[in-house]
Amino acid sequence: MLSSWKGNDCCEWRGVGYDKNNRYVVSLQLRGSVFGNQRPQLYLIDDVKEVGSSLLKLRYLEHLDLSNNNFSGNLISPSLGLMKQLRYLNLSYAQFRGRIPGELGNLTRLRVLDLSQYYYGGLKVDDDIQWISRLSSLQRLDMSGVNLSHASSNLFQVLGMLSSLSWLSLSDCSLKNSHLPSHNHLLNFTLLGNIQHFDMSQNSFHGPIPIFLQNMTSLTFLDISGVNLSLTSSNLFQVLGMLP
């Protein structure tokens, strides 16, 4: 892909979306290859800070895909949080490690955020997860494989503040019962009512099906495989009532 970046006319560069009327770049699709023995396009980029500072020059960028690249265990640059025109950000399977910067919460126009990982533990969040609640336009969030074990116990309450969210994956995030909303929060709790796709598989939940799932009345897909949840006579009809 990068071999096509020759000459001064970036309209002809592969992976670059250019607004010809206003003369600025609006999209970068730098997705790496996952087939055969081809190296990811950004395999040789070691200075992630330099990448971040270069991207900041693209003030009107709305779509950024860096997935399936090898950033060699570097941190996600907090400077991405300055790209406030972004509507799509895909950093999945890009070999990032460490803390997800809270500065991403400044991307209030973001509709899609994909941070999914090949393996558990590469990326993690700290106790303070309020930055997620600022992503008020978010429709799709994929955090599969991200270590959420240190996330505060109000994780689902924070996610419930995203009124536009319809697709959510928290698979293999080392979540446990303490992350589930307590009964004290359920009285006026309309958690994630617009969610259609919800994956909470491969986590450390146990006991009966969480009661908050009853509030997810728009569900068309639910994955709770690989968790130690059980049906009881008391919650069987509640679960059946969730089915479309």
Image (cartoon, helix red, strand yellow):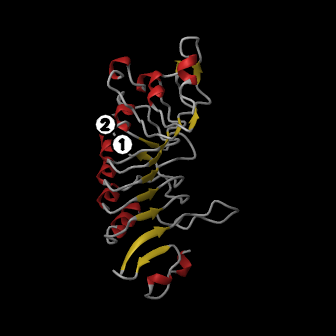
Q: Which mark is residue 163?
A: 1
**In the current view of this chain or complex, which residue is farthest to the top?**
233
Q: State which mark lies toward you, 2 or 1.
A: 1
Q: In x, y percent, where is residue 48? A: 41, 61
Q: In x, y percent, where is residue 109? A: 33, 56
Q: What is the quadrant of residue 82 in the picture?
A: bottom left
Residue displayed at 31% across by 70% down: 59
Q: In x, y percent, where is residue 159? A: 38, 38
Q: Is residue 112 above or below residue 33?
A: above
Residue indicated by mark 2: 128
Residue displayed at 50% across by 67% down: 29
Dot 1 alpha-carbon crowd within 10 angstroms: few under 14, some 14 to 19, many 20 or more? some
Q: Can residue 79 be seen from the camera position used here?
A: yes
Q: Secondary structure at mark 1?
A: loop
Q: Is residue 194 above or below residue 28?
A: above
Residue displayed at 36% across by 42% down: 163
Left/right placement of residue 26 relative to residue 93 reads: left
Residue displayed at 56% across by 74% down: 1
Q: Can residue 151 be seen from the camera position used here?
A: no
* Quadrant where the image shows the C terminus: top right
Q: Nearer the viewer, residue 224 or 40?
A: 224
Dot 2 alpha-carbon crowd within 10 angstroms: few under 14, some 14 to 19, many 20 or more? some
Left/right placement of residue 137 relative to residue 17 reads: left
Q: Earlier in the sequence, mark 2 or mark 1?
A: 2
Q: Secondary structure at mark 2?
A: loop
Q: What is the quadrant of residue 50 in the picture?
A: bottom left
CA distance separating discs 2 and 1: 20 Å
Disc 2 and disc 1 in contact, CB within 8 angstroms? no
Amino acid of disc 1 = Ser
**In the current view of this chain or complex, which residue is farthest to the right?**
36
Q: Nearer the viewer, residue 48 or 25?
A: 25
Q: In x, y percent, where is residue 30? A: 51, 67
